Amino acid sequence: MYKQVRGRIAMNIGFDLPNIGLVGTAEGGAMAHQKQVVLTQSSPRQEPTAASVWYSLTGNPISDELLDWPADIFALTDIILGRTEVYRFVLSPPHGVDWPPRRIPGWSKAVEEAGRQWSLWVENRQTAFPDLLAEEWQAFRERIGRSLEDLAAGHDWRMCEGLMTLHAIADEACAGLGAALDGSGQKGSIYRAHGRELLARTGSLARIHTRSLRVLPKLRTPPAGTAWRSFSRYACVVDGRVDAQWHKVPVRRVGTDARARHANLLLLPWPCACASTTSARWKALCVGQRRSLSASLSLSLQRNWISTL
């Protein structure tokens, strides 16, 4: 299975910036109709599937082309997670199964390493493609025709595992795209630069047309709650109708240790404008407060001096 996936994705060897276009454009959609069998939207008598939901939203099928850019996979998995609420199985998996999967020892570290390898592969196709990503993508692709109702009920647990693992790997691979990370080093710098340019040019980290959705850098993860937005650290999906103009963001630290726990504060001047009379009253108030504080300190010192006699 891995060789099949590796063979398909290895066809795109170059990494030219002009090739990072919008997958959901009219031209891209026409090419998809010519070269691939396009899945139509589900009729009222058909249950929605991962394939039909993605096509109805973006106008493109689920293909290996999405592996060329991690933010595209993040968008796909985030949409399916939101529609099915499969993320709830992280806290309460169905009877007889476990999360994280036992077949993946050290799941958290494995996901982080796969995301790092993926970002390096995007920049340089001569590097190794992560095995975990290939395995989970293959399992996911084989099941995109299953109904979302079955997926939401946890009937196909292998599909649930693949979906959540792909989402986590894609999130790790999006680290440093748009939001600067300290200690990120030089590896993957070209990939991150392309991500920042794509964000500045289109208002999204994904190549999906922004009329459908936007993938934006994430600066803060909610500390509580079980919404699917709480299960990503570096990226999030928002409505495409929300315009985003990204200029500069503060540095975010990598990891979940104590050093990574910090807060970003946005300070806004209030009020935005002050009249000269307001300034005069404020000055008078400050002078009055200083006089009152001085008198209070003087009285306190006198009392303390008298009590020591």
Image (cartoon, rainbow, N blue to C red):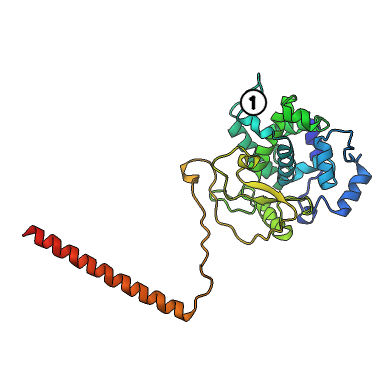
Taking 229 as reference, is 69 left or right?
Answer: right
The x and y percentages for residue 47 are 84, 33
| Amino acid bearing label 1 | Pro
SS class, disc 1: loop
Q: Which residue is mark 1?
A: 93
Q: Quadrant of the N terminus?
A: top right
Q: Nearer the viewer, residue 293 or 90?
A: 293
Taking 33 as reference, is 75 left or right?
Answer: left
Quarter of the image for residue 133 reads top right
Please state the total of marks drawn on the protein image.
1
The x and y percentages for residue 49 are 82, 34
Taking 178 as reference, is 64 left or right?
Answer: right
The x and y percentages for residue 148 are 78, 32
Relative to 248, say whether 73 is above or below.
above
Q: Quadrant of the C terminus?
A: bottom left
Residue furthest out toward the bottom: 276
Q: Residue at x 45, y 77 (%)?
A: 278
Judge whether residue 3 can be spotted in this image: yes
